[in-house]
């Protein structure tokens, strides 16, 4: 079966096998997150404890890095629509990250980590929108929730394996964070090999007619898509980097040695949840699951603020994983359903751009509130913005969203 399956064929059975492209991209994400999550759970400790940075500097580093990636996704999605060469963007983007990520082990100051994270996120920015658009291109509409759920499940499975490997390494060589960071190159090389030989060269979108330049306008998209982006920006303002949850866990008494294990368990639940709930997106519609997920996020964030014991952190990370399972396949499915095939890469670019313009202020604001007034102010603000975003999403999509089979 060719990966050039017509994505708008709604008659395709949801139980049909996922395309080779989707499977390869899922395994690629698994390997990439093994490499990435060997590092991420320990990065807050590395910045704050080893290098002497503050929580505010941590928020600045993570927010700036994620914002750069999100802004670049807009341009990369547009370029992949124009050229039809989504595969090329995916290969270059992953390659950039694979070779730059291990450089974190060479850093001696927080600002240097910031530069390394910016370089790492540059690669992520190049690949993400073209990759998500390619998944939508090669998947029938009736399967998109399951396809994105599978991809995110593989991503989170890798994010579970990476911390396990980190825990084993630190058990054998306590405190040797720099060597651990450098070893992240090995799974990176494996994923580049898989992509080069496994991703079909025919896995490309048809180039869009003409050479329309990138414009910062949402006019090509309808009111439902624009309303969704507005709600997404508001939600993201209250959705700071998960690095702060690791800081909170350590504050509640979880030992540094067990932070990678906590991160591992968290991603196991996220992986299983995405695998299961991806199919529910196709059944009940993405809009309903997004609203439920954002409301769930608000509850869990308030509980993080009120937690007092180490075991609370373990329980809350498991509850927090359900938020990702509810929203990740649903958000990407909604983007794919609301965008026309000729602008699908651009639509995913706008989706990530909307997140990007709010990510930096979100993390900086959270870090400032945490340092100045404590956990209740920081987590409470995030919970309030999440509830407001849920209401906005319902209102902004009410006229046509409830009548549309793609937005329900």
Image (tube, rainbow, N blue to C red):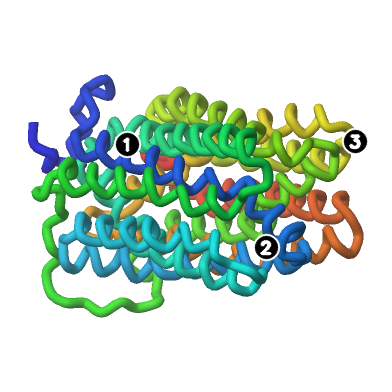
Asked if disc 2 and disc 3 are in contact, CB closer than 8 Å, the reply is no
The tag on residue 308 is 3
Q: Element at badge 1?
A: helix
At label 2, counting other C-alpha atoms closer than 10 Å, the crowd grade (few under 14, some 14-19, many 20 or more) is many
Question: In the rendered image of this protein, does residue 185 appear above or below residue 312?
Answer: below
Depth check: give the residue in front, 374 or 377.
374
Which quadrant of the rendered structure holds the N terminus?
Answer: top left
Question: In the rendered image of this protein, does residue 171 appear above or below residue 280?
Answer: below
| Left or right of 159, for residue 127 | left
Q: In terms of image quadrants, where is residue 297?
A: top right
What residue is shown at x 16% (from left), y 77% (from top)?
211
- Spatial separation of the CA atoms under disc 3 and disc 1: 38 Å
Depth check: give the residue in front, 165 or 362.
165
The tag on residue 362 is 2
Give how far across and how far down residue 256 sits, in percent.
74, 41
Which quadrant of the rendered structure holds the C terminus?
Answer: top left
At label 1, counting other C-alpha atoms closer than 10 Å, the crowd grade (few under 14, some 14-19, many 20 or more) is many
Question: In the rendered image of this protein, does residue 29 appear above or below residue 103?
Answer: above
- Spatial separation of the CA atoms under disc 2 and disc 3: 24 Å
- Spatial separation of the CA atoms under disc 1 and disc 2: 31 Å
Q: In terms of image quadrants, where is residue 94?
A: bottom left
What residue is shown at x 27% (from left), y 56% (from top)?
90
Q: Element at badge 3?
A: loop
Give how far across and how far down residue 246 sits, in percent.
71, 45
| N-terminal-most mark, 1 or 2 | 1
| Left or right of 302, for residue 388 | left
Asked if disc 3 and disc 1 are in contact, CB closer than 8 Å, the reply is no
Q: Which mark lies nearer to you, 1 or 2?
A: 1
Farthest front residue?
173
- Read off the residue under disc 1: 27
């Amino acid at each position: 079966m060719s990966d050039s399956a017509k994505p708008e064929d709604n008659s395709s059975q949801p139980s049909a096998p996922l395309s080779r492209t989707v499977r390869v991209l899922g395994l690629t994400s698994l390997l990439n997150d093994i490499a990435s999550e060997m590092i991420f759970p320990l990065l807050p400790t590395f910045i704050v404890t080893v290098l002497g940075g503050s929580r505010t500097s941590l928020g600045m580093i993570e927010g700036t890095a994620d914002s750069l990636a999100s802004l670049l996704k807009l341009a990369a999605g547009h370029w992949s629509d124009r050229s039809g060469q989504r595969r090329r963007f995916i290969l270059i983007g992953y390659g950039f990250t694979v070779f730059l990520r291990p450089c974190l082990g060479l850093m001696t100051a927080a600002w240097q980590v910031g530069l390394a994270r910016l370089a790492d996120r540059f690669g992520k920015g190049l690949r993400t929108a073209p990759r998500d658009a390619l998944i939508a291109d090669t998947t029938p509409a009736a399967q998109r929730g399951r396809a994105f759920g599978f991809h995110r499940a593989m991503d989170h499975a890798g994010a579970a394996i990476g911390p396990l490997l980190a825990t084993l390494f630190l058990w054998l060589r306590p405190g040797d964070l720099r060597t651990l960071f450098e070893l992240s190159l090995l799974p990176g090389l494996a994923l580049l090999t898989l992509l080069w030989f496994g991703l079909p060269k025919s896995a490309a979108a048809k180039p869009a007619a003409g050479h329309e330049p990138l414009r910062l306008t949402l006019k090509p998209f309808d009111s439902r898509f624009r309303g969704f982006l507005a709600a997404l920006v508001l939600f993201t303002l209250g959705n700071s980097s998960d690095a702060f949850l690791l800081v909170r866990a350590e504050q509640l008494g979880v030992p540094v040695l067990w932070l990678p294990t906590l991160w591992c368990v968290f991603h196991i639940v996220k992986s299983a949840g995405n695998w299961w709930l991806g199919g529910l997106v196709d059944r009940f519609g993405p809009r309903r699951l997004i609203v439920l997920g954002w409301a769930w996020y608000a509850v869990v964030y308030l509980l993080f603020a009120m937690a007092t014991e180490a075991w609370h952190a373990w329980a809350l990370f498991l509850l927090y994983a359900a938020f990702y399972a509810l929203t990740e396949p649903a958000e990407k499915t909604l983007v794919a359903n609301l965008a026309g095939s000729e602008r699908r890469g651009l639509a995913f670019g706008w989706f990530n751009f909307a997140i990007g313009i709010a990510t930096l202020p979100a993390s900086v604001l959270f870090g400032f509130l945490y340092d100045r007034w404590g956990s209740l102010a920081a987590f409470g603000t995030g919970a309030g913005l999440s509830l407001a975003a849920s209401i906005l999403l319902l209102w902004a999509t009410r006229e046509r969203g409830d009548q549309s089979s793609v937005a329900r």
